[in-house]
Image (spheres, grey):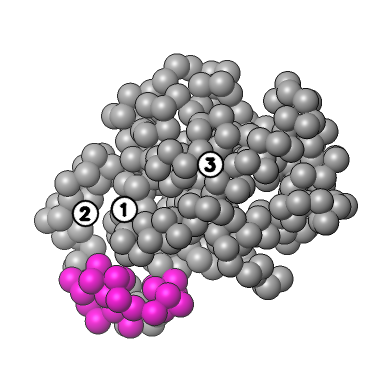
């Protein structure tokens, strides 16, 4: 049993899940999307093999039942959290590895390095907040959205520089201008780094975030790039997403444009040429390691 699972009281055979078993038929009567599962005891194996859209429908039904502004059923919220435990446990493990490599230290204005137990507690508590406050009326891709929001909130608590910057009011106003435009650079860059063609305009922002997050986390753990290179590339990606007009002909889909280099150089305290040189080197290293990343994803599945 994982620490996150224990902290949330979601161990197999526990009281919460026993209550959920007794309520399952009632939930199915209230939301027919749950009928696709076949029964509460079949839920977890069904999630592993069902079609992605069907899984998303079931998770969305649970999200609506468990949300404070929906059915306000804390037991349904517990079942949703149980479904997301594999991703939450992986998130906690990645953050613990990053802490050990001091990946946050250069940009950590609050607090000291946290213990593994403290990170488990942060992930567990934030996951519970997210399943109770999920925006079930407006979102799809429930698992990805909840886990990404959990990650962002935990990073903010850990003092991550870029998450702190996201809370700045003027930065937030920049995001409102259009989500697709904001994440265009991130989608494009994730595809280029991974060696895939660029996604269509309908690709959701959470998929772009997830691709970049998974790639950078893996690359840091596999020592394809150093923590400082990961920090720099993250800054470049986020800055490129903010720049509306970019010279996309200048290497890496516009990541090495003059405006991006200028902003990141001022932020990181290095020269513009250093930003361009290190970014190019990091992207090349990631591109070279792309087959290993794809293999790692396949093994994880």
Q: Is residue 177 visible?
A: no
Residue occupying the point 60% across, 42% down: 282
Mark drawn on residue 85 = 1
Inter-mark Cα distance, 3 to 2: 27 Å
Say whether residue 234 is left or right of residue 291.
right
Q: Quadrant of the C terminus?
A: bottom left
C-beta proximity under 8 Å, tags 1 and 2:
no
**Could you say which is closer to the camera, residue 108 or residue 54?**
108
**Could you say which is closer to the camera, residue 51 or residue 5?**
51
Q: Position of residue 39 (x, y in %)?
A: 22, 77
> Within the image, what quadrant is residue 198 found in?
bottom right
Magenta-highlighted residues: 36-58
Q: Earlier in the sequence, mark 3 or mark 1?
A: 1
Residue linked to disc 3:
152
- Above or below, 77 against 267 in this view is below
- Above or below, 184 against 235 in this view is below
Residue 55 part of the magenta segment = yes
Q: Residues within 10 Å of mark 2 (few under 14, many from 20)?
A: some
Say whether residue 92 is left or right of residue 46.
right
- Above or below, 43 against 190 in this view is below
**Could you say which is closer to the camera, residue 43 or residue 210?**
210
Residue occupying the point 34% across, 47% down: 90
Q: Residues within 10 Å of mark 1 (few under 14, many from 20)?
A: many
Q: Is residue 227 visible?
A: yes
Inter-mark Cα distance, 1 to 2: 15 Å
Which one is closest to the eye, mark 3 or mark 2? 3
Q: Earlier in the sequence, mark 1 or mark 2?
A: 2
């Amino acid at each position: 049993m994982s620490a996150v699972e224990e902290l949330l009281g979601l161990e197999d055979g526990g009281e919460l899940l026993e209550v959920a078993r007794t309520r399952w038929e009632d939930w199915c009567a209230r939301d027919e999307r749950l009928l696709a599962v076949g029964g509460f005891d079949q839920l977890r194996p069904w999630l592993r093999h069902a079609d992605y859209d069907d899984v998303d429908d079931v998770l969305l039904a649970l999200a609506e039942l468990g949300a404070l502004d929906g059915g306000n059923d804390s037991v349904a919220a517990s079942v949703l959290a149980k479904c997301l435990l594999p991703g939450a446990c992986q998130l906690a493990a990645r953050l613990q590895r990053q802490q050990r490599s001091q990946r946050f230290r250069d940009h950590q204005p609050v607090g000291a390095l946290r213990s593994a137990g403290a990170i488990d507690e942060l992930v567990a508590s934030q996951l519970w907040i997210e399943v109770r406050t999920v925006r079930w009326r407006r979102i799809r891709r429930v698992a990805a959205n909840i886990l990404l929001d959990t990650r962002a909130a935990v990073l903010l608590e850990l003092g991550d520089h870029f998450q702190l910057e996201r809370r700045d009011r003027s930065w937030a106003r920049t995001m409102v201008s259009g989500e697709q435009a904001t994440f265009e650079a991130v989608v494009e860059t994730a595809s280029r780094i991974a060696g895939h063609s660029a996604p269509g305009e309908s690709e959701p922002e959470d998929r772009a975030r997830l691709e970049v997050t998974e790639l950078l986390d893996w690359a840091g753990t596999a020592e394809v790039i150093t923590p400082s290179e990961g920090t720099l590339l993250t800054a470049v990606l986020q800055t490129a997403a903010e720049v509306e007009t970019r010279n996309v002909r200048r290497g890496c889909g516009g990541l090495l444009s003059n405006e991006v280099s200028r902003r990141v150089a001022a932020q990181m305290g290095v020269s513009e040429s250093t930003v361009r040189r290190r970014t190019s080197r990091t992207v090349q290293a990631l591109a070279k390691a792309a087959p290993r990343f794809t293999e790692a994803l396949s093994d994880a599945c």
